[in-house]
Amino acid sequence: MTAEYGYVYCLSNSSYHTDLLKVGMTMRSPADRVRELYTTGVPTPFKVEFAKKVLNPKQKEKTLHAILSQYHTSYHGREFFRVSLEEVRTFFDLMDGERWVNNSLSFEDEEESSTPTKCRVMSKCFTDGQRIRHTIGINKTWIGIYDSLKNGINHDTKFYKSVSGFAKAHYTIDRPDGAREVNGWSVCECEVNGEWISTYNL
């Protein structure tokens, strides 16, 4: 029997409550799944919060649903759960597989292509000495410091030229089975006025 690869995903939708997430699987790209779900009955497109390419995705989905059963809600169907993104991300981090990175415009981005793009230039997004954080699972956290003169992130005597390079190095050390490629802007946080916010939203 040949190995079967597919994706497990976690989706959100701005039309729903902030803690209502859809967790499921697809044999196609998560971006394709988002397009499929954007029907006349859904007022706004879904957003892929994170996804992972895994072996035996149907079994992984079944296991995830069993773990999340305590959060299940009948709202819209069996794949919806009232749970925090952080908690679901922890379960995804425990799974072997390759983190999915969307290198093209998402459906949501295509719909809003006329709006200003998000900040993705470190020199414009961060200030000198600002702390940048990347966490794997519950307690594997790296905190780097942005250096405006070098335009990069210093962490534990090492220097990283990009947010993605910083996150990728963390995976290489603490989760060598993690993603080969990672979009650091979607998985890191930065400290603003004493609070940690996602760099994705800058």
Image (spheres, rainbow, N blue to C red):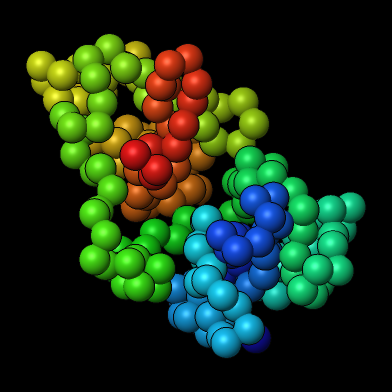
Q: Quadrant of residue 166?
A: top left
- Furthest toward the right, the residue is 70
Q: Which residue occupies 30% across, 41% down?
A: 164
Residue 94 visible in the shown view: no
* 130 w.r.t. 76: above or below: above
Q: Is residue 197 left or right of 96 when viewed as pictured?
A: left
Residue 123: where, in percent of width, then height? Answer: 16, 29
Question: Quadrant of the image for the C terminus?
Answer: top left
Q: Quadrant of residue 159?
A: top left
Residue 22: where, in percent of width, then height? Answer: 67, 64
Q: Which residue occupies 25% across, 32% down?
A: 125
* 52 w.r.t. 129: above or below: below
Q: Which residue occupies 40% across, 68% down?
A: 108
Residue 66: where, in percent of width, then height? Answer: 85, 60
- Furthest toward the left, the residue is 149
Camera-side residue of 192 and 171: 192
